[in-house]
Amino acid sequence: MKKILFYFNSMTPAGGIERVINTLANHFCEFMEVTILVKDKAYSHYPLSDKIKIVSLDSNLELDMNNRIKRIAQSGINLLQSTAKLKHFLALNQYDLYYLAHPLNVLEFHLAKGIDKQVIITEHGGINAYNIIYKKVKQWLYPKARCYVVPTSSDAKAYSELNLPVVYIPHFKSTMNYVRSELSNKVVLSIGRMTEAKRQWIMIDLWDKIVNEHHIKDWQLHLVGNGNLYEQLNNKIITLGLQDYVKILPPVQDVERYYKSASVFMLTSHSEGFGMVLLEAISFGLPCISYDCPSGPRDIVENEVNGYLIPMDDFDALELATVELLSDPEKIYKFANGAFSTSLKWNDEAVLNEWKKILY
């Protein structure tokens, strides 16, 4: 049986990339020996199969987000520390294949062992999601790998034009018990880390208009997540007097209950690597309203079929679409049927077969 090592910073957050790695590992462990190596504690927020081993390098991940110079220095120290510990781990443990999902991890792995045809690199951030240093790492190291797997057709096209060894494989559906929402609660749901990239403040500003200009007061916005913008977003809700209409809820392992208690899903990200939450949302039969941000949403959201795909940063169009949908129960049910039908076309067996071509 082949052995594969997943190397990633942390499996503790309840984020999209952690969900992707979790789902991949749970599939791969049925025919491979799977180990996940993280830098912080050996724990996964999302449930892992008992067949999977998760171990830690015990590296420091703490960064001072309020001091740029200090943060850069800490990043350098963390890089050296993680590389040294990774080199020691790899000297004691041998694997057939290695899975890396971030340019920083690719750089660390190269310094510790070297990038070669045993290494599979995958993508979760869109092509424009990384700074110039990470882009240089991609240009330098990614061509040395076995392949570079990307989950969206647009990124596959863009990276192939840069002569990277691209393979397009969409993500598996997350491992969940998918049951259609009854659409009985007037709740618009959004799930994601509270960071600059996810831009939940746009939805809070939108809800201010929904409540105070359009006088739609029987719908709530539920924001699920945590992150460095939590306090800022919470304060904004209080400042606008929206506490009765906008709720911030904590990430939970049984995230299914959030989907099943909602009737619409919304995404206003600056960019996505894929938009796993959109795939999850349509699988629960939720109509989606999403900005057409680079990478992801356009592969999942079909405009006027399972929701609305809004031109990027067109707030007026976002407002109009939201008001129209919340005011039209028939359209909600129409888009819900479209969402669930679209999700049924997502074929995990076909995705797994594409992965097996790489793994073997």
Image: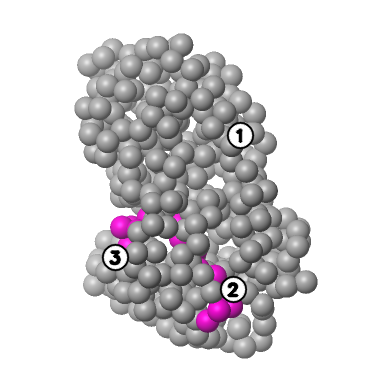
Does the image show residue 139?
yes
In which quadrant will I find the N terminus? Answer: bottom right
In this orientation, which residue lies closer to the viewer: 81 or 189? 189
Q: Earlier in the sequence, mark 1 or mark 2?
A: 2
Q: SS class of the residue under badge 2?
A: strand
Image check: 32 left or right of 312? Answer: right
Q: Which residue is mark 1?
A: 344
Amino acid residing under circle 2 = Tyr
Residue 262 screen position, x and y as percent: 51, 25
Q: Amino acid at mark 3?
A: Asn
Circle 3 residues within 10 Å: few <14, some 14–19, many ≥20? few
Closest to the camera, between mark 1 and mark 3, is: 1
Q: Which mark is residue 98?
A: 2
Q: Residue at x 22, y 16 (%)?
A: 213
Determine the image quadrant of residue 206: top left
First to last magenta residue range: 116-130
Classify 61 as above or below 12: below
Q: Closer to the camera, 303 or 216?
A: 303
Residue 53 visible at all: no
Q: Is residue 294 placed above or below 279 in the rendered structure?
A: below
Name the residue that disc number 3 marks. Answer: 131
- The reply to whether dot 3 and dot 2 touch (C-beta < 8 Å) is no
Type of residue at label 1? Leu
Q: Secondary structure at mark 1?
A: helix
Residue plotted at (42% across, 57% down): 156
**In this image, 155 relative to 57: left or right?**
left
Q: CA distance from mark 1 to mark 2?
A: 31 Å
Q: Earlier in the sequence, mark 1 or mark 3?
A: 3
Residue at 46 percent of width and 79 percent of height: 144
Say which of 330 and 346 sits in front: 346
